[in-house]
Image (tube, helix red, strand yellow):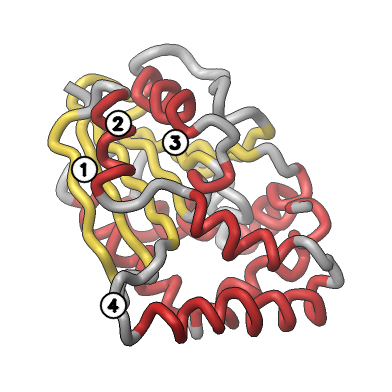
Amino acid sequence: MFDSIAPAYDFMNRAMTFGIDHLWRDKAVKMIKNHHPQSILDVATGTGDLAIKLAHRLTPNKITGIDLSEGMLEVGRKKVAEAHLNDIITFTQGDCLNLPFNDNTFDCVTVAYGVRNFEHLDKGYREMQRVLRPGGMICVIELSTPTSMLIKPLYKFYTRCIIPFIGRLVSKDVRAYSYLPESIAAVPQGNNMLQLMKDAQFINCQFKPLTFGTCTIYTAIKP
């Protein structure tokens, strides 16, 4: 599915969030900056938007992006080359539930709009904790469901009706953008997400809702 929508993925991200997804990434990067990571793993990197932003804003030594979808990575590699960041960012195809990296390898692990696609989220967190160095930070940006009784019905109509309709027109994939609201509704949110992080032996687990609760940033530290 992600291979099929890869050519339209960036456009749809901008369109369906009215460009606010850039601001959400900016907020996450500011939170990461205080930890001064030099080696970053971007899990479920997709087309590399967050990896590229991290490279520009934090100037780390190395960023590694991993994703199951080779189609998404192909788009990402083109963007990295155009940004002249090949010496900093590398992409590899791989399973986020079985990361091909040694223990204690990275200063920071990031995931932008990807954990809701993990088949086993608990295993995903354990793998990310494993490859982090002690004292390293994990930062997860994920779409979420607003709790406001005023915003929630508007959000449901938009995500369940408008986004799938536009997605079918742009990406030509009938399933992809119907899957989006389903995956958002299914993923653990708020304190439930923090509990998964705690179960994976992370500490200082926190979350910050953004834009009426339509997006949430989760952070934690490996002890």
Foreground mark, 4 or 2, reads 4
Residue position marked by numbered label 3 in the rendering: 41
Q: How far separated are the C-alphas under marks 3 and 1?
A: 14 Å
Q: Amino acid at mark 1?
A: His
Q: CA distance from mark 2 to mark 1?
A: 8 Å
First in sequence: mark 3 or mark 1? Answer: 1
Report the mark closest to the observer, 4 or 3.
4
Q: Amino acid at mark 2?
A: Asp
Q: Amino acid at mark 4?
A: Ser
Asked if marks 2 and 1 touch (Cβ < 8 Å), the reply is yes
Judging depth in this view, the residue of 208 and 150 nearest the camera is 150
Report which residue position mark 1 lands on: 36
* Quarter residue 84 falls in: bottom right
- The residue nearer to you, when weighing 91 against 128, is 128
Determine whether label 4 and label 2 are within 8 Å by CB: no
Q: Secondary structure at mark 1?
A: loop
- 65 relative position to 142: left or right: right
Front-most of 24 and 164?
A: 164
Q: Is residue 51 above or below residue 20?
A: above
Q: Which mark is residue 107?
A: 2
Closer to the chain start, of discs 4 and 2, is 2
Q: Secondary structure at mark 4?
A: loop
Q: Is residue 102 above or below residue 208?
A: above
